[in-house]
Amino acid sequence: MSNLDAVYSKLTIKTGAKLALVVLDGLGDIATASQGFLTPLEAAKTPNLDALVRSGCSQGRMTPVAPGITPGSGPGHLALFGYDPIEFEVGRGVIETLGLGIELKAGDVAARANFCTLDAAGLVTDRRAGRIATEVCERLCTLLASKIKKIGTTQVIIVPGKEHRFVVVFRGAGLEGPLTDTDPNREGLPIANASPVDPKSAGQKKVAKLVADFYKAALPLLKNEKPANGFLMRGIAHQPDIPTFEQRYQLKPAALAVYPMYKGLAQLVGMIKIEGPTSIAEQFERYVREYENYDFFFIHFKYTDKAGEDGNFDAKVKAIEEFDAALPILLARKPDVLAITGDHSTPCAAKGHSWHPQPVLLHSALSGSDKLDRFTETGANQGSLGVFEAKYLIRLMQANARMFDKFGA
C-alpha cells in the first residue's frame, strides 16, 4: 500500500452511500474536419444526459495512464477502479479468462486470443477475421481443443469468448509470464513471436516455447478456414496478487457487464459479477433491482468502443443515443454519487485506442454545477474537475459521498 493509499484508508468512513460508475467504453473522441469538427458525443442527441448535466454536474477530462500513453482496456479499467495501472500491471489473458468463468490456478499462464485472417504469405490481413460470429468461434475452438489437449506435459485449455475472441490457458509446472504479444497490432505484418519480457526467466522461456509449439499444432488445423485461418495472442501472463476493491474502499461492489473481459476485470478486484443482462436497458433494470444489495455498481457499455475501432462515426453516435435512451431507468434509483465516463478514448479517426484524455461527468449533492448544457469533450475541457489521473476518480466519488474524515487539524 502506498503512503497516499494509507492516508485515504485512514480517513475512510462507511456511510451507506450508493455509488455508480458507468463506463461507455472508448467514449472519448476528437473533432476532425471529416466529422464536421464534431465528436460523436457532440453530434448525438442526448436529452437525458443533457437534463442530468443541467441538474448540476461537474465535468473534466481524465488521463488513463500518463500523458501520451495509449492504454489497453485492462489498464484503463484498473485506473477507473483506483488501481495505478503502472503498479498493478495485469495481462489481458488473465482478465479475459476470469471473465469467462475459468478459475486460474497457481502457475497457470493465460492468453487472450483473436482469430484473424492470413494471406498466402502468412501476413495478417484482418486482425479480427471480420468479427466472425460467436458460433463460428465456438466451432473453431472445439476443433482446436479436440486436437490439442497437451503440449508435452503441459495441459492446454481453449475456451471461446464472444465473436472472434477466445482464451488459451497453459497449465503445468514451471510456467511464468509475462511474454510479448504475437499480435503485430496492424495489418500487413506476420504473426510475431512471443518472447520473454525477462530474458533471464526460465519460466517465461518455457512458455515462449509452448506458444511456438501451440502455433505449430494449431495453424495447420485452421488453414482451410475462411476468414478465420489464423489467430493472434495478447496479454500472455499469470494472475498477480491484487488487493480487493472492498478492502481498499470499504464499499461492497457489483459489476454489470456483458463482455467477458470486463467481467474478468471486475472479478480480478473482487467485484460480484451479476449475470444475465445483455443490453444497457437490462443492465440498468438489474441495477434498480439490486440497488439495496451493494454499495458500488460498475456498469459497462461496450458499443461506443466497437464503433470507434471500426472508424464508424454514425455507429458511435447511435450507440451513445442508445445509452441515453436507457438512462432514465438508472436515474429512477439515482445513486448518491454517479460518474459517467470512458475507460479511454477511441477516436473514429484513429480506428483504435488513443492517448487523448476521456471526458468524465460527476453528479452528486455536492458536485456543484459547471453551468454547462451538455456532456461533451468541449464542455469537459471547461469543467471544474480539470484534467486529472483516472486513478483518482474513485477517491473523488468517495469524497462526494462524504466518505472521508478531515485530514489534519
Image (cartoon, helix red, strand yellow):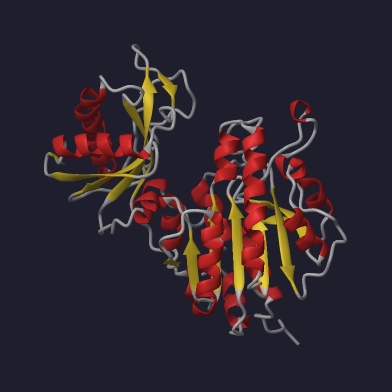
Foreground pick, 107 / 310: 310
Q: Measured along the vertical axis of the image, is residue 371 above or below residue 166?
A: below
Q: Measured along the vertical axis of the image, is residue 116 above or below residue 250?
A: above
- Farthest residue to the left: give it: 153
Q: Position of residue 184 (x, y in %)?
A: 44, 27
Q: Where on the picture, by quarter, is residue 81?
A: bottom right
- Farthest residue to the bottom: give it: 409
Instruction: Give the left or right position of residue 355, taking residue 185 as reference.
Output: right
Q: Where on the picture, by quarter, is residue 233?
A: top left
Instruction: Give the left or right position of residue 241, taking residue 316 as reference.
Output: left
Foreground pick, 342 / 156: 342
Q: Is any atom of residue 355 visible in this view? A: no
Q: Is any atom of residue 254 visible in this view? A: yes
Residue at 61% over, 85% down: 15
- Number of marks in picture: 0
Foreground pick, 44 / 168: 44
Foreground pick, 148 / 242: 148
Q: Position of residue 193 (x, y in %)?
A: 34, 28
Q: Position of residue 54 (x, y in %)?
A: 83, 62
Residue at 38% over, 58% down: 240
Residue at 62% over, 39% down: 346
- Farthest residue to the right: give it: 371
Which part of the image, by quadrant, shows the C terminus?
bottom right
Q: Position of residue 56 (x, y in %)?
A: 81, 67
